[in-house]
Amino acid sequence: MENNNKNTKDEKKAFYTFYEGKPVIQASRLAGFLKEQNFMRISEEGNDEVTIIHNSRKILKPFNYKTNTISYLKKHIKHPEKKMQIENMLVSQRSVIDSCWKLFDGESYNLHKDTHHAIYIPFQNGVCRVTKDDNEMIDYSSDEIGFYIGTESQKHDFDIAGLVERGIGDFERFLIFAIIGRETHELTEEEMKKVISLNSTIGYLISNYKNPAFSPAIILSDEDADDVARKGGRGKSLITEAIRKLRGVLFRDGAKFETGYRHVYADLELYHDLYILDDVLPGFNFNALYTDITGDIRAEKKGTHPVTIPFEDAPKFVVTTNYAVRHDENADSTNRRFIELKLSYFWNIENTPEKFFGRRFFEDWNQQQWQLFYEYMATCAKQFLTTGLIPIEYEKNNDNYNAYFSNEVVLEEFERIYSEMKLKGSFTVTNFLEEHERSKIFRYNNKIFNHRNARKHINAYISKQNKD
């Protein structure tokens, strides 16, 4: 009698029942079971796809219901003696399993958003609220806290007391050396300004609040870059990886990014706080991102209707490149939408962070290094909230020159023409191109200069000569 009662209780808790000794499932019972397991169906305007999220203490994890539902249910079989029979039933009733998700009422993500005055960083033991005046740990149960997508930081406890007298960990030292270009424990006044600017930039990227008046894209580039040599290894990827430890980030191969492609944002979701275009090619058209940086984003998956992600929910942009970033001093509106952060050649293929510190970042860290890392990130958040985003002012004449004249053939032909033009005292772009036409080498072959690029080359060359 006792055993029968136990079987009855197990059956009530299970996602299946028995009929004439055989296991059966019903869509409504299965839906009720999955709701008790904290699954949610997300509803988005204009999106008819079924999107399932598993909610664990306000931490959201996307769930591929088409491939993972059966394996999930197998872990919740209450009758081990009939396990094989129940598993066979799951496979045969796949259509019922898929249909049960349609019984869920659609819900919004209700993702947590930072504010102009506070940044919230999620950890395992709560959420650290950072303002310019104080720091406080808040429990996930608080109404002040919304949902978060799952990140590495939620696997770690954070000791907020460490912010009072914090130390300097590997990651902070790595960034300081990367931005100032040397190893030191004492910074000059100019170096301190660079570090403060760096910290404000990191804080800006941590915050998922977007100021309608000023939310620029961040360009991570290399000092003394040109359009030919790829001297990577400066640390750009470690910066973007660090942000991913705290926020939802979507990485895209910059070489394959097509701004005019209608499905270019097909994989963009509301929980992505940063959109990272990694390693864009020389001559990348930054202007093509202007609309997406300043307004709503149209995300369209193949075979579905487009979904508009409003500006306040759209991600901030980060672009990384190993090449020189061109600058048009007359394009004020565009220039305000991009903030460049250059990394020195301190870190390179011969001097890697792993060799210098004797361990791999993130993978080999102990609890102390993780604590120091999160202390630094919280400090950067406070820097941003206190001062706002502080750009570093760079001399862009060199970048333009390096971008346009990295090829010796181009430079040699330009200087030949330019020397002829100087004899005239003054000249026009047409005069310049006419002289290019007289070249025996380029008269019948592909010409280097044309009406689209000649003026840019001339301006870059003259600006560099005037500076020197």
Image (cartoon, grey):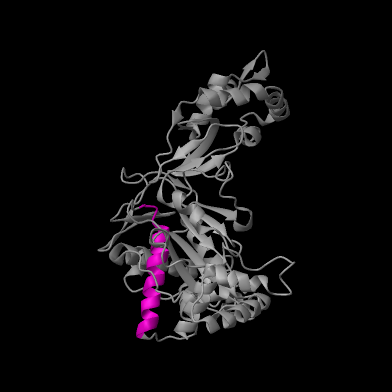
Furthest-front residue in this view: 424
Reply above or below: 410 against 155.
below
Instruction: Identify the residue at horizontal 64%, vertical 28% (top origin).
Output: 79
Q: Residue 7 sits in which quadrant?
A: top right
Q: Is residue 25 visible?
A: yes
Majority secondary structure in the magenta region: helix
Position of residue 210 in the picture relative to residue 246 (left or right) = left
Residue 191 drawn in magenta = yes
Which quadrant would the N terminus be assigned to in this image? top right
Furthest-left residue in this view: 133
Position of residue 81 in the picture relative to residue 381 (left or right) = right
In the depicted view, which residue is nearer to us: 397 or 71?
397
Residue 241 drawn in magenta = no
Instruction: Identify the residue at horizontal 30%, vertical 67% (top origin).
Output: 387
Instruction: Identify the residue at horizontal 67%, vertical 31% (top origin).
Output: 80
Instruction: Identify the residue at horizontal 46%, vertical 62% (top origin).
Output: 218
**Residue range corresponding to the magenta coloring:** 189-210
In the depicted view, which residue is nearer to us: 351 or 327?
327
Reply above or below: 105 against 424.
above
Residue 136 placed where, x, y %? 30, 58
Q: Can residue 154 be seen in this view?
A: no
Residue 449 placed where, x, y %? 62, 68
